[in-house]
Amino acid sequence: MWKFLADDEGLFIGANFGRRCQALECLVELLNVFNDFSMFGVQSDDDNLRYINWLSDSYENNKIRALEILEKMPLPGFQVSNLIKSNNIN
């Protein structure tokens, strides 16, 4: 389901506005229900950094939905502790 919404049919490069909105809403709902990325095959690989491109959507609501997903995602470079270290925040 994740691959279908995130890569194949939902959030691929060039996807139209409606498709992007619906895919992000569905992904947020999936995470609210299951709350575990491992069942979707999402690991903490550096390859998953491609999902950060979702933040470049032209629609602000899509950026908010993408951030809701990315905050929960096991991305090494997107975890709060790593962001604090990389920005020298005490």
Image (tube, rainbow, N blue to C red):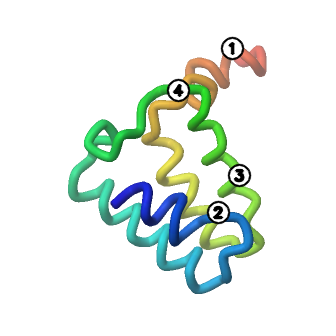
Instruction: Specify which label sits upstream in the sequence, 3 or 2.
Output: 3
Q: Who comes first in sequence, dot 1 or dot 4?
A: 4
User: Which quadrant of the figure contains the N terminus?
Assistant: bottom left
Looking at the picture, tell me which residue is in the foreground, 52 or 65.
52
User: Looking at the image, is mark 1 or mark 4 nearer the viewer?
Assistant: 4
Task: Identify the mark nearer the N-term, 3 or 1.
Answer: 3
Circle 2 is placed at which residue position?
63
Label 2: few (<14), some (14–19) or many (≥20) C-alpha neighbours in 10 Å: some
Question: Looking at the picture, which amino acid does disc 4 mark?
Answer: Asp
Spot the residue most to the bottom: 18
Which comes sooner in the sequence, label 4 or label 3?
4
Judge depth for marks 2 and 4 and give the one in front. Answer: 4
Q: Residue at x 66, y 46 (%)?
A: 52
Q: Which marked residue is nearer to the observer: mark 3 or mark 1? A: 3
Mark 1 or mark 2, which is nearer the start of the sequence? Answer: 2
Q: Residues within 10 Å of mark 1 (few under 14, many from 20)?
A: few
Which numbered marker is on residue 85?
1
The percent coordinates of residue 85 (x first, y second) are 69, 14
Q: Residue at x 56, y 19 (%)?
A: 81
Residues at circles 3 and 2 in contact by the CB criterion of under 8 Å = no
How far across and down, in percent of the image, does residue 17 sit? Answer: 66, 83
Q: Earlier in the sequence, mark 2 or mark 4?
A: 4
Q: Nearer the viewer, mark 2 or mark 1?
A: 2
Which numbered circle lies on residue 45?
4
Which numbered disc covers residue 53? Answer: 3
Outermost residue, left side: 33
Callout 1 amino acid: Lys
Q: CB under 8 Å between callouts 3 and 1?
A: no
**Vertical arrangement, residue 7 with respect to residue 88, above or below:** below
Instruction: Give me the residue at 77% from left, 21% from top.
Output: 87
Viewed as shown, does residue 2 lie left or right of 81? left
Where disc 4 sits, the SS reads loop
